[in-house]
Image (cartoon, grey):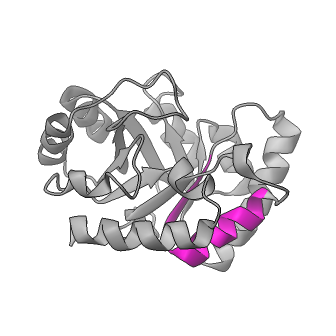
Amino acid sequence: MQNLKLNNKSLVLYAITDRTWLNGKTLPEIVEEAILGGVTFIQLREKNLCLEEFLKTAKEVKKVTDKYNIPFVINDNVDIAVLVNADGVHIGQSDEEIITARQKLGYDKIIGLSAKTVAEAVKAEQNGADYIGVGAVFNTSTKLDADSVSIETLRNICKSVNVPVVAIGGITKDNVLELTGTDISGISVISAIFAQDNIRNAASELIKLTKKIIE
């Protein structure tokens, strides 16, 4: 039973949180600004919080995503996703095995997986991934160890799987149109929204550009 919140429209503008640019605001506040600007999907990514703080933050952000009926997933941490009843998780190739994650979460939850090659993407789909994040498609400052994925590889991945594909990594309003013709379902961004002076406007501009690619 697939999660009813997951469809191609919900993946158009997928935002990953980062507390680097809070500038005196709370994480839930900037998440709400992003959603009001047009963000269609939220991933909570916290690498440095203790379990208690992570859980508290996840609950607070989920209140915002529930308010707007926006899909909400947790990066890497399946246990936190279970505890807050998130819509799912996003895991990497080296994170918790997707089959184990599915057993913990159930079949009505979203599981996204990162992939850099056609083989990884096909395997992810075979193991039950609901969508695949592919990148980094451009150089990125938020994940310094990210290997780049060519536009051609992105296009080939999209052709090779039946689940939605989201491009990630270094995407900005200035280069997003370079992804035209790849058959992605959306883009996933961090700094292109959360590092901007006006988060709401940044999201609004990005979703307009992204819709030109996918429609």
Residue occupying the point 51% across, 24% down: 144
- Relative to 204, is 28 above or below? above
Reply yes or no: does residue 32 show up in magenta: yes
Q: Which residues are magenta?
A: 27-44
Left or right position of 17 against 54? left
Residue occupying the point 18% across, 57% down: 180
- Relative to 59, is 143 above or below? above
Q: Magenta stretch: dominant SS? A: helix
Q: Position of residue 107 (x, y in %)?
A: 46, 53
Quarter of the figure that contains the C terminus: bottom left
Observer able to see residue 151: yes
Residue occupying the point 63% across, 50% down: 17
Query: Of residues 27 and 203, which is closer to you in this image?
Result: 203
Q: Position of residue 58 (x, y in %)?
A: 75, 53
Count the labels in the image: 0
Left or right position of 36 against 21? left
